[in-house]
Image (cartoon, helix red, strand yellow):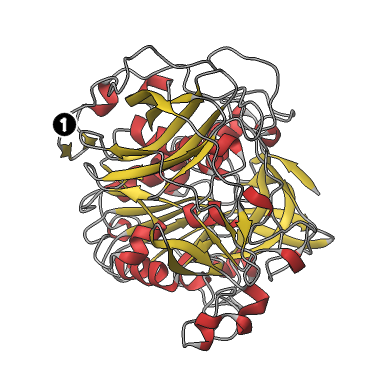
Amino acid sequence: MAEPSRRGILGLGLMAAAVTSCGARHPDAAPVPHRSDGGPAAAGTGSPGTDGPGARGPAPAHHAAGKDGPTGEQSLPGTPGWEITDPGPDAAIEGFADRVSVLPGEAFGLHVSTPAAAFTVSAYRMGWYDGARARLVWRREHVPGSKQAAPHVDPATRTVQTGWQRTLAVDTAGWPEGAYLLRLDAEDGSGRRYVPLTVRSAVTAGKTVVMSAPATWQAYNEWGGHSLYNGPTGGLATRSLQVVFDRPYDYDHGAGLFLVYEAPLIALAERLGLPLAYTTGIDVAREPGLLTGATTVVSLGHDEYWSPEQRAHVVAARDTGTNLAILGANCCFRRVRFEPTALGPDRTVVCYKAAWAQDPGYRAGAPATTDFRADPGADPESSMLGVIYDGYPVDAPYVVSSPGHWAFEGTGVAAGASFPHLVGVEYDRVDTAFPTPRPIEVIAHSPVVCEGRRSHSDTAYYTVPSGAGVFASGTMRWVEALDAHGPGGGKADHGIDSQAGDVVRKVTENVLRTFAAGPAARTHPAQDNLAAVYGTA
């Protein structure tokens, strides 16, 4: 099965394909990456700008983070032309950062390989910017290029390793917090690539926390021929048992899953003017108190790979009143462990899956790196999410079942309202065979048929004694649909039309605004309806 997942607004693509079985156990399915294999020349793909050697480029906004995020940031003009539409050949230029995230003012290293004599690196902060979606914060031109060594594969774990030398040290002084794409442009015009980076928030109190999911991006990354899903044979026998951040991403021109599953939500949240903080799941795992006082934690699109520490810290935040918005499906399905590489801590994602017993870390006493719901140490993710992953692949209409729920306010939907293609490609449902928080409301109950098995995708909302509310969309296409503005029926946005896009945008706005106001149960306690929906007491 192949699933085109094309963001029409950016002209970027991601393919999802798999040989799977549909059911409560997650199949080892992996996207077939949209590789950067060149294409016709397009506008906006040349060397971006004419700053002198070593220039820092446009001055960043030197504003302290205020109650509405970086003060004044969204009032600044965006920078058109940041998109890569013609990446050039695979090896024309590519790179990675030696930090997944940095605090403002911290430095990081860029490791770049290119046969070009020189390249330009431009740092774009991603957001709304009156629809431009990015602002140029920093640029360095005429960086000497060099072709780095070919990668090698560790025979024990089939991990792709580069050993590349650092090309450039980058100082982030003056960079506002946020999600960034660094754009690498070979100055001979041969190629262009992205490198993602989060400039993270040190404090999240009083803010909606955008929690990026780079561990999942890396799990699916097949740069060098191996991911946590596939190896050269295209199957499990040669897949990696652990993967590292010390390599480029081979899809979406180096952006990982960011443009598909995260950028649309960031654009919406910044357009709404919400007080935002930025972090990654890796940072949440490492820093137990990072989420203290946060109003909301947002999990985006496809956020499958979590460490036990990340999960424990998110649950602890929920249990002290922080709301959770799960805007995707298949969240927190895999249990992983982070280990260091030569470049720093937490740069290895370990997940042996069915081969967990072979994991040296498990033999030394660490939790098994397999599915959270599986033994040993089974701890189904539904106790945090309310919903649980149920299957892949599906393509189905999204069906509203509780139009009077506050999340649908202002949408004008009626009971039974149906929005084609919004459910897919993976989906979640409420299933009381697994631990399920109560009270819980199912507000959209969408019939699906997954490889012959009839089931439902559920959008659900539950509340807990701390006052926190938890919203789960139940479909992986939720964030992508934020950018659905067309007539539907084609390949763009899976055929999702503007009517579905309007509903998703409004529901997301309702959820984010309500959650930003504080513990949602105080004003919007869940009204349990499982008896009516599933006949479950």
Rendered view: 386 above or below 524: below
**Residue at left offset 29%, top offset 20%:** 57
Rendered view: 53 above or below 176: above
x then y, percent, for residue 104 = 23, 42
- Residue 174 lies left or right of residue 265; in this view the side is left
**Residue at left offset 74%, top offset 51%:** 394
Q: Nearer the viewer, residue 226 or 137?
A: 226
Q: Nearer the viewer, residue 326 or 432?
A: 326
The crowding category of the residue bearing disc 1, from other C-alpha atoms within 10 Å (few below 14, some 14 to 19, many at least 20), is some
x then y, percent, for residue 271 = 35, 30
**Residue at left offset 62%, top offset 84%:** 357
Q: Can residue 440 be seen here?
A: no
Q: Nearer the viewer, residue 244 or 1?
A: 244
Q: Which residue is mark 1?
A: 63
Q: What amino acid is found at the position of numbered circle 1 in the picture? A: His
Point out the image quarter for the C terminus. Answer: bottom right
